[in-house]
Image (cartoon, rainbow, N blue to C red):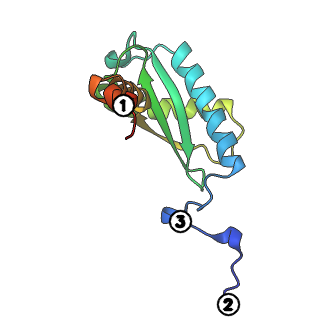
Amino acid sequence: MSSRSRHDVKGPAGVSAHGPSTRQLRVAEEVRRVLAELFARTEFRDPELLDVRITVTEVRISPDFRHATAFVTRLGRSDVEVLLPALKRVAPFLRTGLSKALNLRTVPEIHFQPDTALDNAMELDEIMRSPEVQRDLNSKPE
């Protein structure tokens, strides 16, 4: 029998099979909060980010706390993918802002991904409202 306990179970890429730890969740939320503040009060020099409202919806931290994936969306628009190169360019500046605001041993490197949850929910809502689905939902089984 192995000497590993049931708490040592690891999934792919070293991620715990039980999901993120409490500390990962807490740090991720703090990173999200600070990034949201930075996006709200900073005027970026990058022309692609001028007058752009970016919302950070979620942050996920790697188990070693070296990488943070920030899920972002544009307020009122769904074309955040075009901003990803500009966000990558300002990531070092944002990381510096994180280091000043958070008391962490290692400040994570920031990676950006578009948040498609709202788009997916709207698409699902549209499907659910379609006449075909409504007909199937309202029909009684024989």
Crowd tier of the residue under label 2, counting other residues whose Cα lies within 10 Å: few below 14, some 14–19, many 20 or above: few
Spot occupied by residue 19 in the image (x, y as percentages of width and height): 60, 54
Spot occupied by residue 37 in the image (x, y as percentages of width and height): 59, 20
Earlier in the chain: of badge 3 and badge 1, it is 3
Q: Amino acid at mark 2?
A: Met
Crowd tier of the residue under label 3, counting other residues whose Cα lies within 10 Å: few below 14, some 14–19, many 20 or above: few
Q: Label 3's element?
A: loop
Earlier in the chain: of badge 1 and badge 2, it is 2
Spot occupied by residue 52 in the image (x, y as percentages of width and height): 40, 14
Residue plotted at (48% across, 64% down): 12
Task: Point out the residue furthest to the bottom here.
Answer: 1
Question: Residue 11 shows which numbered tag?
Answer: 3
- Compute the Cα span from label 3 to label 1: 43 Å
Q: Amino acid at mark 3?
A: Gly
- Find disc 1 in the rendering and name its residue: 139
Residue plotted at (70% across, 68% down): 7
- Find disc 2 in the rendering and name its residue: 1
Q: Is residue 140 visible?
A: yes
Q: Quick check: 9 above or below 97? A: below
Task: Point out the residue furthest to the front here.
Answer: 142
- Compute the Cα span from label 3 to label 2: 20 Å
- Compute the Cα span from label 1 to label 2: 55 Å
* Front position in the image: 81 or 131: 131
